[in-house]
Amino acid sequence: MSDKKNKVTVQIYGESYALKGNIEPERIMRLAAMLDERMNKTAKANLRLSPTKIAVLTALNIADDFLRLEQDYLELIDLIKEDK
């Protein structure tokens, strides 16, 4: 990662966001596309929710995914330690 600030404009759930940071523009665009896809999927399954509630529900789903992956990772580390 460099110290150079990159600016990228992305579309997430119909809104435009100008993002600035030291992450590669391609990564920012990929993250935004993934979030947009997840929000649209959440919206299709919950037709009556407001955009704010769709964003929160999507964030909770992503947080759940993270915790599951973290748990899997910790279990794998334990397995590796046991094999040594």
Image (cartoon, rainbow, N blue to C red):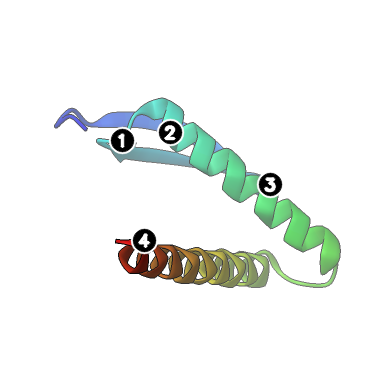
Cα separation, mark 1 vs mark 4, equals 32 Å
Cα separation, mark 3 vs mark 1, equals 21 Å
C-beta proximity under 8 Å, tags 1 and 4: no
Under mark 2, the amino acid is Arg
Q: Where is residue 53 in the image (x, y as percent from the top left)?
A: 65, 72
**Disc 1 or disc 4, which is closer to the eye?**
4
Residue identifier under label 4 = 80
Under mark 4, the amino acid is Ile
Quadrant placement of the N terminus: top left
Counting residues from the N terminus, which is met first, the one under dot 1 or under dot 4? 1
Q: Where is residue 63 in the image (x, y as percent from the top left)?
A: 51, 69
Residue 37: which numbered mark, if any? 3
Residue identifier under label 2 = 27
- On the picture, is 2 further left or further right than 32? left
Per the image, label 2 sits on a secondary structure element best described as helix
Asked whether residue 83 is in view, the answer is yes
Location of residue 50 by image quarter: bottom right
Residue 23: which numbered mark, if any? 1
Q: Where is residue 47 in the image (x, y as percent from the top left)?
A: 85, 67
Counting residues from the N terminus, which is met first, the one under dot 4 or under dot 3? 3
> Residue drawn 59% across and 39% down?
33
